[in-house]
Image (cartoon, rainbow, N blue to C red):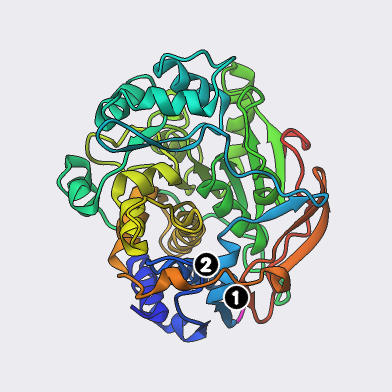
Amino acid sequence: MEATRILKDIWLLAGLPEAALAHARLTGADPVLPSSFAVGAAAQATIAAAALAACELGHARGAPRQQVAVDMQHAALDCTGWFSIDGRVPALWDAFSGLYRASDGWVRIHANFAHHRDGALRLLGLDPATAQRADAEAAMRSWKALDFEDAAAARGLVATALRTFDEWDATTQGRALAAQPLFSIERIGDAAPLALPALAAEARPLEGVRVLDLTRILAGPVGGRALAAYGADVMLVNSPHLPNIEAIADTSRGKLSAHVDLRSDAGRDVLARLLADAHVFIQGYRPGGLAALGFGPEAAARSRPGVVYVSLTAYGTQGPWAGRRGFDSLVQTAMGFNHAEGEAAGDGKPRPLPMQILDEATGYLIAMGAAAAMGRQQREGGSWHVQVSLGQTGHWLRGLGRVAHGLRAAVPDRTPFLETSASGFGALCGLRHSAQLSRTPAAWPRPSMPPGSHPPVW
């Protein structure tokens, strides 16, 4: 399926005006990275949708429309999430993350957070203080894959059994995901259109838009970073007691970064004050987690009529896994992608997609959905709820079809697309944003800073 048609389908699902599509220019074709799936087209189309939706909101604020150009190779490399700090490229994975052979199949464990790693090792009967990877591999062979998946989920851990596409389709969760759209934008309350400051002709399209980003891994931070690239004031709100991964250095470009402890009354009061002046609220907490603290979508809409509230989940809002934690690598494994890539390679060994494309594409759908919903808020009033999930994005990616001989593609040189900037983490080298806006180029003038570097005030 050609990328322009993919973009059109996303655009019309969001209820955006078809006339704006004439201002999108997409170049390149899959394969651009080694995969039998259309990962390049997925990256390109979602990035183009995010940038074009931001420009369309700018147009609604009185600015002329402008061309948005996205090259597929640049977009795909953008979605690899590569970066370095002071010349050091951080490891993507903990030593215990990855695929393990079980007695009847394979299991993938996500161990990038210490509490998830230690929990998985204890479930395997191992002491986290002394266990080695080989010990975990030996212990896993005594488990059936689905039994370990169920036991891990019961303990709030993150591990999934490897499935084929047919096996996933036969599950209740697979059927539930297949019945859901790629994303949804729903009106959840009444409100007058929120006033936005006048937009100068040279201003980026989202200047004056305030975004609260309550996300950590990885789709949400990518979405917030995209909104910042298009001019929004994005405040990343981290808990002082929760860990982060090193990718926060890359995904915090362009953002304010504050600490707020939502376990305390004082912290919740701070968030309520921030929400009172926000236009967009993005959250990736476990389902129901923020609602229990008084910041679910309906409560946010009552507190801040006119807000656009974006919810990110792993497996969607329906089905028995709706409340289950998950990360991109695990969703790939559960839904059949790892098995399918192994089959395409011909060696029978499961293999991941060449980047965390479910995270990345979902992140750009967050940015697109937020901008699209803000446009509707400006036209119609109301408060709005945008819902996305890694699983829905995965189902959509599968529907884009396969790329013949895609695994033969070589990874292209990223050097032409890199930029280096000062940051609170050190010299940060990363990919330039791949959407080229003809009149108001995307940029991150605010440097990436560690959590807690800014006070929680607009």
| Front label number (2 vs 1) | 2
Q: Mark 1 packing: few (<14 Cα in 10 Å), some, or many (20+)? A: some
> Mark number for residue 423?
none
Q: Is residue 108 above or below residue 178?
A: above
Relative to 30, 235 lies left or right: right
Identity of the residue drawn at 60% across and 75% down: 62
Q: Disc 2 marks which residue?
A: 47
Q: Is residue 182 visible?
A: no
Under mark 1, the amino acid is Gly
> Mark number for residue 62?
1
* Magenta part of the chain: 61-65
Q: Residue furthest bottom?
A: 22
Quarter of the figure that contains the N terminus: bottom left
Predominant secondary structure, magenta span: loop
Quarter of the figure that contains the C terminus: top right
Mark 2 or mark 1, which has the lower sequence index?
2
Q: Nearer the viewer, residue 362 or 121?
A: 121
